[in-house]
Amino acid sequence: MTADAMSAAGLPAEPPAEGQLDALIEENEQLQQAVHSHAVVDQAIGVLIAVGRLTPEQGWHVLRTVSQHTNVKLRTVAEHIVTWARTQKLPDTISTQLQQQLESAHLLHIKE
């Protein structure tokens, strides 16, 4: 591809310098991790919607609250919940907090 064709395609005419290439590789890895994390969080919300008969907003709230109350990263809680859907195994602290939050979500739903 010629320099003019590369420029027209929105690509740099010259390859990035060594430091730029390393930065681009790191940014790409971070973006891939973010996409994966987002997908896992969405899957966990889906599990909570199905198991807890919640709305998407309630599922997000339960997931976020479990993360905050257990001091475990949101992504990690989401991974545990997705695994739990397959294996029925969940760490005790997350299980206890999840049960409390699901009960709380149902109480709020009844009051509405």
Image (cartoon, rainbow, N blue to C red):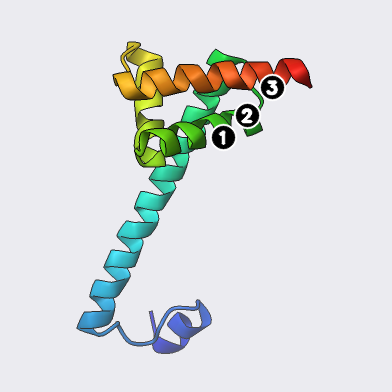
Q: Position of residue 48 (x, y in %)?
A: 53, 22
- Residue 79 percent across, percent down from the top left: 36, 31
Residue beneath the point at 40% across and 88% down: 3
Residue 35 position, x and y percent, is 43, 48
Lower sequence index among marks 3 and 1: 1
Q: Are marks 2 and 1 in contact (CB under 8 Å)?
A: yes
Quadrant occupied by the C terminus = top right
Tell which tag, 3 or 2, sits nearer the viewer: 3
Instruction: Residue type at mark 1: give it.
Output: Trp
Q: Under tag 2, what secondary structure?
A: helix
Crowd band around label 2 with a 10 angstrom C-alpha radius: few (<14), some (14–19), many (20+): many
Q: Is residue 5 above or below residue 72?
A: below
Task: Tell me the SS state at disc 3.
Answer: helix
Disc number for residue 108? 3
Amino acid type at mark 3: Leu
Circle 1 is placed at which residue position?
Answer: 60
Q: Quadrant of the N terminus?
A: bottom left
Identify the residue shown where x is 37% and y is 33%: 70
| Disc 3: CA contacts within 10 A as few (<14), some (14-19) or many (>=20) | few
Looking at the image, which residue sits at the far left?
18
Residue found 31% across the figure and 58% down from its top = 29
Disc 2 designates what residue?
Answer: 58
Task: Say which of 50 and 99 sits in front.
Answer: 99
Task: Measuring from the top left, give residue 98's x and y in whole percent.
Answer: 45, 22
Do residues under tags 3 and 2 come within 8 Å of each other at their CB atoms? yes
- Identity, as a three-letter code, of the amino acid under mark 2: Gln
Judge by depth and name the residue closer to the eye, 102 or 5: 102
Q: CA distance from mark 3 to mark 1?
A: 15 Å
**Distance (Cα) linking label 3 and label 2:** 10 Å
